[in-house]
Image: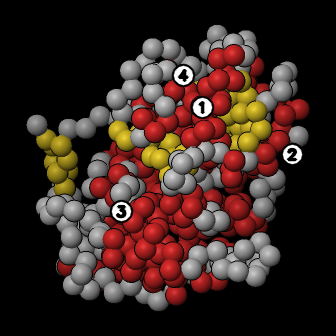
């Protein structure tokens, strides 16, 4: 059985098969919400939780603020791998803990979620968890996530990305057992994040929201989540990047991150998301920076079939008066205008941020400013890893490895991708 949504204008009649959304995470958002942590732990029956905290967050007084009684596990993003998950399982078990509290960015939340999943099914290691679902829960492990960065949205997803300790490539785990019980969104927890890192977070939210809306699995509920995330980003991103102590704007961006994460958890990502994940796991290019650079190029690659949605977004975000046009030429023109708006939005958002945020990979240098982080000869390896990701299965167009290389090349040198190129002809009706 299916139902149809009809309406004049931008979106032609779109047919959705029956679908289910499993979103069990209780989200508590507000300034000072962190004070509820003791009562929330008690409500979960926990008296001896394991705290997993990012190294950056641990240096901001968060440990003292949380009132952590025992020594927490402190992790940096570069230390986190599949081996880390196994060590956390051992620490949890030998320490007789009864819940997990993850405090940090996406990497810390993802590794905590992975440990939770392993504890609920002790017969499997991280490599065996890779892929889609299939976990048989034998033990309930309550998890509370407290984001201290903006953008990952990991607290609202059933996804986790963990670096394979053996190959160095990302493991993608997709399982409802990864859902946290509670996500605490307190804007004070991310006050120490720099303007640059905040801008990266905004790019991550924007990219996840847009790619979830253009996914082949997009449905009305996820579109509503993503659309609200976009509205919150547009309304609050400039304030949160340039006035970090604006807690109202910071809270709205945190909510946008959670909404975009919930959307993409159901729909899957696409090219910008997939390549950004691979780059963040294999190079020193962060996920947010990858999104900022790749998103316009990925949207141009996926233009065929996404014109109605992108044109609709153009009408809403750029305030076009052409809301009800349905001519294919006009749809494509407005879709391309929206992609241009995305690029201009990023440029305007970061124009006064120091140091300057690159708009192409060619300009991304190491911390000493001496060497480029990504070189042309690395692109084939990055594309090959990305090609095997399940995230690409929900892309509107199905890219080949060579297509992914061409997207990376366009993002590296900063030239616009020709969406009319005949090589871009792979659809879901063809085998990859």
Q: Which residue position is annotated with label 2?
A: 59
Q: Looking at this rendering, what residue extends furthest in the left direction?
A: 1
Decide: few, some or many residues near mark 1? Use Cα within 10 Å; few <14, some 14-19, many ≥20: some
Separation (CA) of disc 2 from disc 4: 29 Å
Q: Quadrant of residue 199?
A: bottom right
Q: Distance between the residues labelled 4 and 1?
A: 9 Å
Q: Looking at the image, how many numbered discs can be counted on the residues? A: 4
Query: Which callout, 3 or 2, points at the residue further toward the start of the chain?
Result: 2
Q: Say which residue appears at 45% left-offset and 14% top-offset.
A: 138
Mark 2–mark 1 distance (CA, rounded to whole Å): 25 Å
In depth, the one of 133 and 86 nearer the eye is 86
Of residues 166 and 215, which is closer to you in this image?
166
Which color mode does the image show? secondary structure
**Marks 3/2: CA–CA distance:** 38 Å
The answer to whether residue 371 of the structure is visible from this angle is yes
Q: Where is residue 206 in the image (x, y as percent from the top left)?
A: 52, 62
Q: Earlier in the sequence, mark 1 or mark 3?
A: 1
Up the image or down, 298 lies above or below 54; here it is: below
Callouts 3 and 2 close, C-beta under 8 Å: no
Question: What is the secondary structure assignment of the residue under circle 4?
Answer: helix
Above or below — where is 158 with respect to 233? Answer: above
Q: Is residue 186 left or right of residue 15?
A: right
Circle on res. 86: 1
In the rendered image, residue 154, in percent from the top left (x then y), is placed at: 55, 44
Residue on which disc 4 sits: 119
Q: Residue 76 carries which label?
A: none
Q: Do the residues labelled 2 and 1 touch (CB within 8 Å)?
A: no
Q: Report the residue marked by disc 3.
A: 387
Q: Earlier in the sequence, mark 4 or mark 1?
A: 1
Q: Nearer the viewer, mark 2 or mark 1?
A: 1
């Amino acid at each position: 059985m299916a139902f149809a949504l009809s309406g004049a204008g931008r979106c032609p009649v779109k047919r959705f098969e029956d679908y289910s959304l499993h979103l069990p995470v209780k989200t508590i958002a507000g300034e000072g919400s962190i004070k509820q942590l003791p009562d929330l732990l008690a409500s979960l029956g926990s008296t001896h939780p394991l705290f997993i905290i990012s190294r950056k967050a641990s240096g901001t007084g968060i440990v003292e603020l949380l009132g952590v009684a025992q020594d927490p596990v402190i992790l940096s993003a570069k230390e986190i791998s599949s081996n880390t998950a196994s060590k956390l399982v051992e620490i949890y078990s030998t320490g007789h803990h009864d819940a997990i509290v993850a405090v940090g960015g996406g990497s810390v939340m993802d590794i905590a979620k992975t440990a939770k999943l392993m504890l609920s099914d002790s017969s499997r290691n991280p490599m065996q968890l890779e892929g889609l679902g299939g976990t048989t829960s034998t033990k309930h492990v309550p998890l509370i996530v407290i984001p201290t960065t903006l953008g990952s949205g990991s607290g609202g997803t059933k996804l986790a990305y963990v670096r394979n300790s053996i190959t160095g490539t990302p493991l993608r785990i997709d399982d409802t057992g990864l859902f946290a019980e509670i996500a605490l969104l307190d804007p004070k927890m991310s006050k120490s994040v720099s303007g640059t890192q905040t801008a990266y977070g905004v790019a991550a939210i924007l990219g996840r929201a847009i790619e979830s809306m253009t996914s082949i699995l997009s449905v009305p509920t996820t579109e509503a989540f993503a659309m609200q995330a976009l509205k919150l980003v547009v309304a609050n991103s400039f304030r949160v990047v340039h006035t970090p102590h604006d807690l109202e704007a910071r809270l709205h961006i945190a909510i946008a991150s959670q909404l975009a994460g919930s959307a993409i958890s159901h729909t899957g990502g696409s090219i910008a998301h997939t390549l950004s994940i691979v780059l963040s796991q294999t190079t020193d290019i962060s996920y947010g920076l990858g999104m900022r650079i790749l998103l316009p190029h990925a949207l141009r690659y996926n233009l065929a079939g996404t014109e109605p949605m992108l044109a609709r977004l153009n009408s809403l975000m750029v305030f076009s008066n052409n809301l009800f046009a349905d001519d294919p030429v006009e749809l494509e023109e407005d879709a391309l205008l929206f992609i241009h708006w995305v690029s201009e939005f990023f440029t305007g958002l970061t124009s006064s941020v120091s140091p300057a945020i690159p708009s192409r990979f060619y300009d991304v240098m190491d911390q000493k400013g001496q060497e480029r982080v990504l070189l042309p000869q690395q692109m084939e390896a990055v594309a090959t890893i990305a090609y095997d990701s399940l995230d690409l299965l929900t892309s509107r167009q199905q890219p080949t490895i060579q297509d992914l290389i061409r997207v990376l090349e366009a993002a590296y040198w900063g030239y616009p991708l020709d969406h009319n190129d005949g090589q871009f002809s792979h659809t879901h009706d063809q085998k990859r």
